[in-house]
């Protein structure tokens, strides 16, 4: 590509709202432009990167035996009602009503559509296994889109769906997709870690996320510093402490704590510390009220609580419900004297506590010296709290959990029959019985990968694209466009490299060397070739590898081979 | 691709709602599946065709110097308000409101977004000319989607936009796109005709449409049977007849025509014919009321009327306005005695009429024997009527216009500065003056091309894809999968053809020859290769060209070359 004919629009400064390097550099380098909050245009340079990333994904999907399809943006309401997600998917998808008063959502994910598609075509067990994927625009009604391409309202995803006869088949399809993801991230030079994860609105088990550790990520993973345990924040578990015998010396004591509703207010008033208080949080599930107890300095993990009660509908109790159950205002609930039909579920950590503080189920009052057994009974012990940096690892003897910021790039789920049952994607087995097929689903954030690549590979001067994602493999800078001899050399190198299948950005513009060098560093093609003074004086071109600044000279006659060898190393 | 591993789902019967061949065959062949009215899934076979068509378009766009971008589906309301189209674009685009109460439309076209994009980046005259394109999903709130992929609610388009300094630049950019379109349709074997067209909601001049003549098209073109004049229905003009002197013998006569409001009712009651009546249609424009007169058997073409009054806002007068102007109910308006400020514009054809019938501007009454001059004056003569099959051509002496059904596949417009002025896409010229850039826009219906290909290339047995669009170039049918010798031959041919860059669908399934032949004909790869009895008995494979049934034999050793030669001819 001749730079003089291309759409190169670099910026000296990024807009102030661009807070992280990928957002700043993708704007500055002329890869993307904002259209609205969380909505972007992809400029020619960005579109090339996007297509290259898509191509890597496409090749690995095809190699894994998946077949590419294309599903629509508009999803009829009826399909989402069959799955039960029209009213429950969070956040509520963007919705549109047409002139004929038909309702649609803009697909945030395609389980309904793909399952309905397969249901139309699926007949016999001979029709499966099959895995279908698409690379398609998706939508999410983000209240606060941020981080440039990290969290958008409109973004590109690759989503794949597998359909199998049985669990063993699903395991094989899942493993094939998992392995394909590993290869994708290897080819893109992205050192991801895979972690345990929650399925969220999608549903399913064996969910794993592929995370890129990055200080600008918006997710957190906990990784053991000793063993290979890794989990996202929603799933991470710490070691369960040894139970202690309650001290038993002290008697429960009722104290006034006027208007002290928060842990800080209560512990301040009672001159104690949050780790000596037990918080009582009231929930409503399908099967009744639940009181969840965690230590005062811990955060309750609602995913864990929901999982413990086996996914019954779960929500925070309303203020009125709390008042009704405890007889006290919100802020003074405690486990002592709750109605019998409230199920008390306590975090394991409370087993190691004695003589603790709890709410007294009376307005403006707390209890001191509360003990399990002496003062109340626990129905279930469970892991309810969020893990913390420095927690002991539950999976080895000596490790501690380290909290790390990360960017979620991919997610694999075993869905089972949730969608195939709801949408009648059944097959006849060898005996003629109708069974729902067993599904898996597998997503990769394509546009998010572009941001992750920049987060991982940049310096103060700009982006350092890995070879497979780069907009061009090499850029040639012709420093004296008026020198006909040099121009002929650069022209030939440009043509020869293209003949060898290398995508080249050839900067033959009438601009200063300083501008060309700066722009080349900002745009970040893996290999830079300078045709300039050294070429005239010594018959050599200057090569430079963007990622580490490695430089070498090559005779003009050997330049093509040298560029290709250097590119191979990027 | 091994058929046994592929997603092939052919149907014996197409659903009854599929009324045209492309819809039926794309469903039956397993290329597409319905999701909702005018919304489709692309199955693996269909997705391959779509990608091949996209690739042809992409290559020709790139060869023409255009650069690929990707713009979003969600268009902020603010952008469409700047262009004035938020409330005026017809049909109203699908709209969505997010949680933060921001409004968007789902892009039916991208003038606003691209112009805003370029406005951000455009600085100097050195930045242009530039032409940007995208291949992207688009939306149109069709009340009655029909014809399968011909008219959809959600569809794929390639849209390109050029930005120039001046009219000469626009002409060059326009010609480059026009020529690229010619090449695209040549490569896809689509014998399009280009016709004059109207710009509609997009605006602009020099609009041309690329039409494929097809009895299942929903558009009409008029083509001269003698010269090369061709136009779509909105623009087509017929020869203007010679004026005649009014007969002048007869005197205007008022007659009762109770409740006769339509041309048929009036002429029936008065025992005359529609070609002896003049219809008077009342409109309101920015500059006042207009009475448009056309012969009773003709249809008024509102585009022509609007063009004649130079694009002032034009709408039909309301019933109340008609009553007010004429003093009569709707159905009895006529040119005689209208208020002076009503501009009377008459179709040229009326010059050749005398002693005609008109409404009398009195309830339930018409005039007989009306004549221009004697009874009323015409302010402007103009071409106002729709052309008809058999009209004399206006562009040659002897031709007649032939009405033909067609499918619109592409459309090119010169936009001028409509969007660049509204959205501040200005550049500084060499003297430092700010000017809006001059725009063109160029659209191709990508998914519609897939339908058009099938309309053009099919027979009773199925589709006959041209080479560049075909899902696979060749299909190998192995008729005796259990015969190890034959399987080895077919396996090797499959592998060798792929090594030569041919995409091959290899049907090695355990199915009957009849099923394989029928499915191959239905799916329609250009070249079929049969490895079967002839191979065992004579050492030859059977080749067949799908489009014309041409058959030949090739020695196994020469099979690759023979397939490639045959494919080249498709």
Image: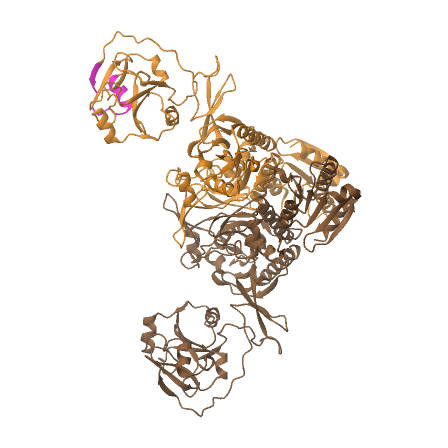
Chain colours: A brown, B orange
Q: Residue furthest top?
A: B249
Q: Which residue is drawn at the image coordinates 22% and 24% (left, top)?
A: B326
Q: In the rendering, at what x and y percent does residue B99 appear?
A: 40, 55
Q: Quadrant of the C terminus of chain B?
A: top right
- Residue A165 location, quadrant: bottom right
Q: In the rendering, at what x and y percent does residue A155 appear?
A: 51, 51
Image side of residue B86 versus residue B435, left or right: left
For the magenta stretch, what is the residue range?
B253-270
Image side of residue A285 versus residue A464, left or right: left
Q: In the rendering, at what x and y percent does residue B362 appear?
A: 20, 22
Asked if residue B122 is among those painted magenta in the image, a careful observer would answer: no
Of residues B485 and A408, the one nearer the viewer is A408
Q: Is residue A314 visible?
A: yes
Give the vertical position of A239 relative to B419 (above or below).
below
Of residues B318 and A310, the one nearer the viewer is B318
Q: Is residue B509 visible?
A: no
Give the vertical position of A194 relative to A248 (above or below).
above
Give the vertical position of A230 relative to A156 (above or below).
below
Asked if residue B260 is among those painted magenta in the image, a careful observer would answer: yes
């Amino acid at each position: 590509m001749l730079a003089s004919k291309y759409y190169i629009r670099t910026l000296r400064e990024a807009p102030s709202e661009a807070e992280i390097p990928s957002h700043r550099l993708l704007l500055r380098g002329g890869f993307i432009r904002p259209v609205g909050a969380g909505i972007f245009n992809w400029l020619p340079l960005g579109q090339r990167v996007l297509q290259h990333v898509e191509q890597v994904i496409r090749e690995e999907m095809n190699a894994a035996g998946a077949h590419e399809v294309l599903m629509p943006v508009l999803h009829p309401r009826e399909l989402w009602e069959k799955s039960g997600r029209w009213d429950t998917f969070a956040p509520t998808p963007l919705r549109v009503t047409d002139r004929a008063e038909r309702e649609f959502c803009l697909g945030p994910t395609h389980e309904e559509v793909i399952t309905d598609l397969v249901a139309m075509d699926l007949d016999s067990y001979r029709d499966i296994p099959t895995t279908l994927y698409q690379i398609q625009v998706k939508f999410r009604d983000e209240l606060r889109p941020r981080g440039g391409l990290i969290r958008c309202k409109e973004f590109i995803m690759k989503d794949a769906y597998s359909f199998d006869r049985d669990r063993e088949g699903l395991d094989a399809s899942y493993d094939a997709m998992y392995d394909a993801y590993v290869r994708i991230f290897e080819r893109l030079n992205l050192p991801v870690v895979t972690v345990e994860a929650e399925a969220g609105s999608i549903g399913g088990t064996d969910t794993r996320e592929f995370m890129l550790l990055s200080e600008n990520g918006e997710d957190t993973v906990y990784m053991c510093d000793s063993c290979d345990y890794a989990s996202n924040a929603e799933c991470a578990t710490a070691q369960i402490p040894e139970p202690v015998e309650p001290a038993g010396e002290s008697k429960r004591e009722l104290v006034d704590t006027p208007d002290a509703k928060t842990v800080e207010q209560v512990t301040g008033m009672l001159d104690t510390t949050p780790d000596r208080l037990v918080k009582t949080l009231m929930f409503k599930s399908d099967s009744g009220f639940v009181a969840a107890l965690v230590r005062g300095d811990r955060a309750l993990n609602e995913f864990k609580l929901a999982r413990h009660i086996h996914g019954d509908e779960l929500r925070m109790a309303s203020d009125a419900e709390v008042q009704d159950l405890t007889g006290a205002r919100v802020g003074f609930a405690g486990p002592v004297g709750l109605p019998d039909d409230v199920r008390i579920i306590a975090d394991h950590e409370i087993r190691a506590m004695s003589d603790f503080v709890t709410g007294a189920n009376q307005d403006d009052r707390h209890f001191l010296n509360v003990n399990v057994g002496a003062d109340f009974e626990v129905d279930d012990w469970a892991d309810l709290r969020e893990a913390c940096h420095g927690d002991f690892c539950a999976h080895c003897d000596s490790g501690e959990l380290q909290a790390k910021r990360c960017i979620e790039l991919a997610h694999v789920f075993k869905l089972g029959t949730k969608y195939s049952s709801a949408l009648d994607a059944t097959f006849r087995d060898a005996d003629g019985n109708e069974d729902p097929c067993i599904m898996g689903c597998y997503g990769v954030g394509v546009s998010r990968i572009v941001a992750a690549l920049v987060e991982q590979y940049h310096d103060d001067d700009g982006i350092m694209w890995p070879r497979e994602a780069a907009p061009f493999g090499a850029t040639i800078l012709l420093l004296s466009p008026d020198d006909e001899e040099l121009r002929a050399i650069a022209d030939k190198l440009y043509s020869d490299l293209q003949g060898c299948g290398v995508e080249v950005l050839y900067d033959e513009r009438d601009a200063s060397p300083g501008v060309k060098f700066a722009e080349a560093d900002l745009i970040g093609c893996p290999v830079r070739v300078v045709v300039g003074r050294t070429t005239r004086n010594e018959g050599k071109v200057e090569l430079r590898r963007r990622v580490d600044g490695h430089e070498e000279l090559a005779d003009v006659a050997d330049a093509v081979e040298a560029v290709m060898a250097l590119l191979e190393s990027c």
